[in-house]
């Protein structure tokens, strides 16, 4: 059935909010939060650790910390609590992004089982399975992902267990990789240029002859598609391939984005068809999928990436995150002097819906609205 991606109009009179048709929490995040809180209830008196941030949302992580949960690592993999401090009686929750085989082994050696409280999203596991499938056919895996992101590190580890693996962050890096495929660059330079991004024993002269592309599930779908199409074309030209034998050198994996990433991104394309004055995207500042929604919006109109309603300081001042420069900025006069003001609103997969509601409430509070939120909500009941 064809999905509907037209936004929902919340018409408050002087301010009109266009809410993306799909936004916010996905199955994987809900499942992870559910398991995490159940783990707390099931283990009174035990020390409970999270391998790293549960999901990239500060509020959810703070709620867990308030219930006594501690983080073992920060979001970049830096150790906060040393493994030596753990005992077999501790509980360690694996987050939705999954983890590396090396960390799993370390925990198992201490006597901490990694399966019982494992919240790895099935859509992330699907990528690992896809990697294994192409590894069996002797393809090298190219992972399109952010090299330091937990999920990409986990996927890299799982793929590298089966086959040579390399990570590319973007099209520029895919182009550089292609120069090693074609021989334009000397294979000896590969190890410096892709330092920390290739699996142990990777042989740039041999391991780039058969490849397949998988991705971090929250990358921009159009970017992954472009990278896969580009590398496929490089193989076709290098080996003079046709439709019947392209698979000799390039495995068509189809993209490995999850449904939530796809739906949230497609809903933003639907949202952007509405002429509007500004867009507000709600989510954690280190959330990959949220930053991609921001990226799509900012191509079209002024866009403010905020972690919650408290970032809307007044009717004229907003604190918002520039994910390119990784800094929080304050912008004045973010709401134009016109009526009605049209605002596009969406949120990332790790953002609770209540936070979006709070943002809308705050925006509406600046106007003598014709209707209350409750009255408007009743019309959708
Ligand atoms: S965004 Fe997708 S892959 Fe990530 S946790 Fe949600 S459903 Fe799973």
Image (tube, rainbow, N blue to C red):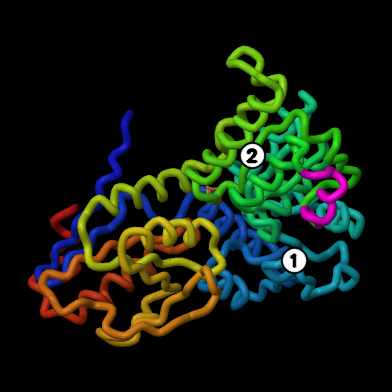
Q: Secondary structure at mark 1?
A: loop
Within the magenta stretch, is there residue 191?
Answer: yes
What span is in magenta? 185-195
Residue 322's mark? none
Q: Which mark sits nearer the N-terminus, 2 or 1?
A: 1
Given residues 42 and 126, the one toward you in this image is: 126
Identity of the residue drawn at 20% across and 77% down: 336
Is 268 placed above or below 72 here? Answer: above
Frontmost of labels 2 and 1 is 2
Label 2 sits on a secondary structure element that is strand
Residue 230 pos. (x, y %): 58, 36
Does residue 179 belong to the magenta stretch?
no
User: For the N terminus, which image quadrant?
Assistant: top left
Q: Which of the 4 quarters of the picture holds residue 339?
A: bottom left
Mark count: 2
Disc 2 + disc 1, Cβ < 8 Å: no
Query: Magenta region's main secondary structure?
Result: helix
From where the camera sits, is residue 310 visible?
Answer: no
Task: Give me the residue at 78% from left, 48% from top.
Answer: 157
**Residue labelled with disc 2:** 214
In the rendered structure, the answer to whether residue 35 lies left or right of residue 280 reads: right
Q: CA distance from mark 2 to mark 1?
A: 22 Å
| Residue nearest the viewer, comparing 288 with 336 | 336
Residue at the spot of label 1: 77
């Amino acid at each position: 059935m064809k999905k509907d991606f037209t936004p929902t109009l919340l018409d408050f009179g002087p301010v009109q909010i266009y809410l993306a048709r799909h936004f916010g929490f996905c199955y994987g995040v809900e499942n992870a939060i559910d398991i995490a809180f159940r783990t707390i209830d099931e283990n009174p008196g035990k020390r409970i650790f999270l391998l790293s941030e549960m999901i990239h949302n500060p509020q959810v992580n703070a709620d867990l910390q308030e219930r006594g949960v501690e983080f073992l690592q920060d979001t970049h993999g830096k150790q906060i609590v040393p493994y030596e401090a753990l005992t077999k009686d501790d509980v360690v929750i694996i987050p939705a992004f999954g983890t590396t085989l090396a960390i799993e082994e370390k925990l198992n050696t201490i006597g901490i089982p990694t399966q019982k409280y494992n919240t790895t999203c099935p859509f992330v596991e699907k990528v690992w399975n896809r990697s294994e499938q192409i590894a069996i056919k002797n393809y090298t895996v190219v992972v399109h992902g952010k090299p330091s992101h937990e999920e990409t590190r986990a996927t890299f580890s799982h793929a590298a267990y089966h086959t040579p693996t390399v990570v590319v962050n973007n099209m520029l890096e895919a182009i550089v990789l292609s120069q090693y495929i074609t021989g334009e660059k000397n294979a000896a330079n590969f190890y410096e240029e892709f330092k920390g991004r290739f699996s142990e024993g990777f042989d740039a002269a041999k391991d780039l002859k058969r490849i397949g592309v998988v991705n971090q599930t929250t990358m921009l779908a159009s970017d992954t598609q472009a990278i896969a199409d580009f590398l496929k074309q490089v193989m076709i030209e290098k080996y003079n391939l046709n439709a019947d034998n392209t698979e000799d050198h390039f495995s068509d994996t189809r993209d490995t984005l999850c449904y939530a990433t796809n739906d949230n991104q497609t809903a933003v394309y639907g949202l952007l068809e509405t002429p509007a004055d500004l867009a507000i995207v709600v989510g954690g500042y280190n959330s990959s999928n949220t930053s991609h929604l921001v990226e799509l919006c900012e191509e079209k109109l002024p866009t403010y990436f905020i972690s919650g309603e408290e970032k809307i300081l007044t009717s004229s001042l907003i604190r918002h995150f520039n994910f390119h420069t990784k800094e929080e900025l304050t912008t004045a006069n973010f709401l134009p002097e016109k009526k009605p003001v049209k605002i596009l609103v969406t949120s990332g997969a790790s953002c609770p819906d209540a936070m979006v509601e709070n943002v809308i409430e705050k925006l509406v509070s600046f106007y003598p609205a014709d209707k209350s939120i409750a009255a408007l909500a009743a019309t959708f009941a």
